[in-house]
């Protein structure tokens, strides 16, 4: 068993296909399949079920992936620790970004990291806030931006910003008035929510208010793009910040109103595992994230309040 084989296994596991892993590592698919076949032969188990549309991990594949994550974490930590003695930021850092953050700073993060830290390999994973939290706990990402994370002993968090939430929908649903709408009235409207675990928590932090919104859920969707389409079709309204739905608000058929009594805000926090203190590379990326968010808010691109 070699590190190269484990890297290839990791890539197939995370992309779900030999073709995806081939693109990640710039290697022929036949060579990848050969390496995985040898690995399975050595271990005496099947790691993947071969399917027409990709590769699905077996129970043994899931077990190996957990070991592989710890192995590569140890390798990266060793490399970063030794390079840190020369003041070099190096290693691999994976960051989980929710849709809004990816839209606002994702490209700039990749560009700035490449320019400032040439020895750093940065991976950016797009996901809903709840998915990013799961990835963080599995060890699939090192840092994650999370909306309204619950207090948990296994997490360390620092708040970066707050966003005011709006009620967005067609005028026949949310009304034509430019005046704010009371939360009690919003809670009576058909709601569109994202369907991923506790994703609704990224909308409303207060559990009492959250339950009222979830009870009015008419359709649960699996992507932000589907949510936008459902809004335009008039299937219901959604609660969200201007930054997330800025593009859909350009559609003249939709209208946004501020929510009052109470005003609804959400917190964006940087999170990492308590058992994995940040190394030099992770701290460098965390500082860069904080700087880019401050720039986006200061320039007016991100309609939010910076945490001071």
Image (cartoon, rainbow, N blue to C red):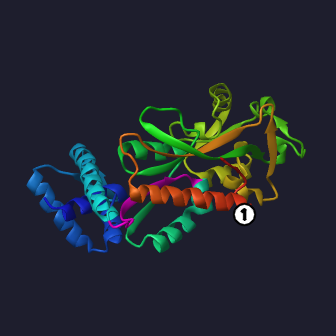
Query: Residue at left 70%, top 42%?
Result: 239
The N terminus, quarter of image: bottom left
Residue sitting nearer the eye, 176 or 68 = 68
Query: Residue at left 79%, top 39%?
Result: 259
Question: Toward which corner of the image does residue 260 lie, by quadrant?
Answer: top right
Question: Toward which corner of the image does residue 172 lie, by quadrant?
Answer: top right
Task: Specify whether residue 88 is painted magenta.
Answer: yes
Looking at the image, which residue sits at the far top? 208
Left or right: residue 148 compared with residue 89 = right
In the rendered view, tell whether residue 276 sits above or below residue 102.
above
Residue position marked by numbered label 1 in the rendering: 299
| Magenta residues (range) | 86-99
In the rendered view, tell whether residue 132 sits above or below residue 28.
above
Q: Position of residue 9 (x, y in %)?
A: 25, 58
Can the viewer see residue 192 in this picture? yes
Left or right: residue 62 compared with residue 182 = left
Query: Residue at left 55%, top 63%?
Result: 106
Q: Position of residue 262 (x, y in %)?
A: 77, 32
Task: Specify whether residue 109 is painted magenta.
Answer: no
Can the viewer see residue 103 in this picture? no
Residue sitting nearer the eye, 81 or 141 = 81
Q: Secondary structure at mark 1?
A: loop
Q: Residues within 10 Å of mark 1 (few under 14, many from 20)?
A: few
In the rendered view, tell whether residue 81 sits above or below residue 186.
below
Left or right: residue 160 compared with residue 301 = left
Q: Position of residue 231 (x, y in %)?
A: 71, 49
Residue sitting nearer the eye, 204 or 230 = 204
Query: Residue at left 39%, top 42%?
Result: 137
Q: Position of residue 256 (x, y in %)?
A: 80, 48
Residue sitting nearer the eye, 112 or 110 = 112
């Amino acid at each position: 068993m070699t590190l190269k084989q484990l890297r290839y296994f990791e890539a197939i596991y995370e992309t779900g296909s030999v073709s995806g892993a081939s693109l990640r590592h710039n290697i022929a698919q036949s060579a990848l399949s050969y390496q995985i076949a040898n690995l399975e032969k050595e271990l005496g188990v099947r790691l993947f079920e071969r399917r027409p549309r990709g590769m699905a991990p077996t129970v043994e594949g899931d077990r190996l992936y957990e070991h592989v994550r710890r192995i590569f974490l140890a390798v990266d930590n060793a490399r970063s620790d030794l390079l840190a003695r020369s003041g070099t930021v190096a290693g691999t850092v994976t960051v989980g970004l929710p849709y809004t953050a990816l839209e606002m700073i994702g490209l700039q993060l990749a560009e700035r990291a490449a320019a400032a830290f040439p020895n750093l390999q940065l991976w950016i994973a797009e996901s809903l806030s709840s998915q990013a939290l799961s990835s963080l706990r599995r060890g699939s990402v090192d840092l994650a931006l999370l909306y309204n994370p619950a207090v948990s002993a296994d997490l360390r968090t620092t708040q970066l910003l707050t966003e005011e939430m709006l009620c967005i929908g067609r005028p026949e649903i949310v009304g034509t008035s430019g005046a704010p709408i009371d939360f009690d009235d919003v809670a009576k409207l058909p709601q569109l929510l994202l369907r991923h675990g506790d994703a609704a928590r990224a909308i409303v932090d207060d559990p009492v208010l959250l339950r009222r919104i979830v009870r009015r859920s008419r359709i649960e969707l699996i992507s932000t793009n589907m949510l936008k389409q459902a809004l335009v079709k008039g299937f219901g309204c959604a609660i969200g910040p201007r930054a997330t739905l800025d593009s859909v608000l350009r559609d003249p058929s939709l209208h946004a109103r501020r929510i009052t009594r109470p005003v609804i805000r959400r917190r964006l926090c940087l999170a990492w595992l308590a058992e994995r203190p940040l190394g030099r590379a992770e701290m460098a990326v965390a500082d860069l994230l904080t700087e880019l968010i401050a720039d986006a808010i200061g320039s007016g691109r991100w309609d939010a309040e910076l945490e001071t």
